[in-house]
Amino acid sequence: HVQLVESGGGSVQAGGSLRLSCVASGPTYSMNSMGWFRQAPGKEREEVACIFNGGSGRYGDSVKGRFAISRDYGKNTVYLELNSLNPEDIGMYYCAARSEGTCATFFRQSLVDYWGQGTQVTVS
């Protein structure tokens, strides 16, 4: 059973940056795709970023060019660099993992195998 624990959220001013971390424990070798979703107050959870087997990332339209995802297999950790933050980036950020499929289908939330508890990002 894979467990995902996020950290790194916080409150920043518009234009600032944050780095989120997601530490995975358990049979993480089975997780081909890992990534991030977010949910703003009163809105549905939306796609943010995905990384497949250490390759290049795939991003939601609202974060392209500003966010960057990476994966450190040695540390069982996925990172999300958030740059040029604005108030539209406010929300709870959730780490997610799937054992099958690629980033082409990662953002179908019903197919996600594991979810973290989330870390809050606030922009003022």
Image (cartoon, rainbow, N blue to C red):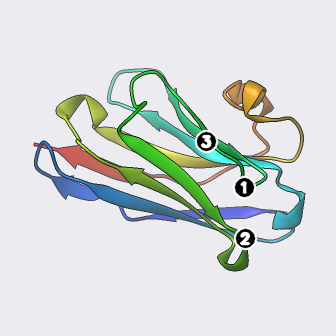
Q: Amino acid at mark 1?
A: Gly
Amino acid type shown at disc 2? Tyr
Instruction: Return the mark for residue 81.
Output: none
Residue appearing at x 87%, y 47% in the figure:
99
Q: Is residue 112 left or right of residue 66?
A: right
Mark nearer the N terminus (3 vs 2): 3
Circle 2/circle 1 CB separation < 8 Å:
yes
- Residue linked to disc 2: 73
x and y percent of residue 25 in the render?
A: 74, 72
**Marker disc for residue 57:** 3
Q: Residues within 10 Å of mark 2 (few under 14, many from 20)?
A: few
Towards the viewer: 59 or 44: 59
**Location of mark 1 (residue):** 54
Residue at 12% across / 42% down in the picture?
14
Q: CA distance from mark 1 to mark 3?
A: 8 Å
Of residues 51 and 23, the one nearer the viewer is 51
Q: Compared with residue 97, is residue 109 higher up or lower down, i.e. above or below?
A: above
Q: Position of residue 85 (x, y in %)?
A: 23, 41
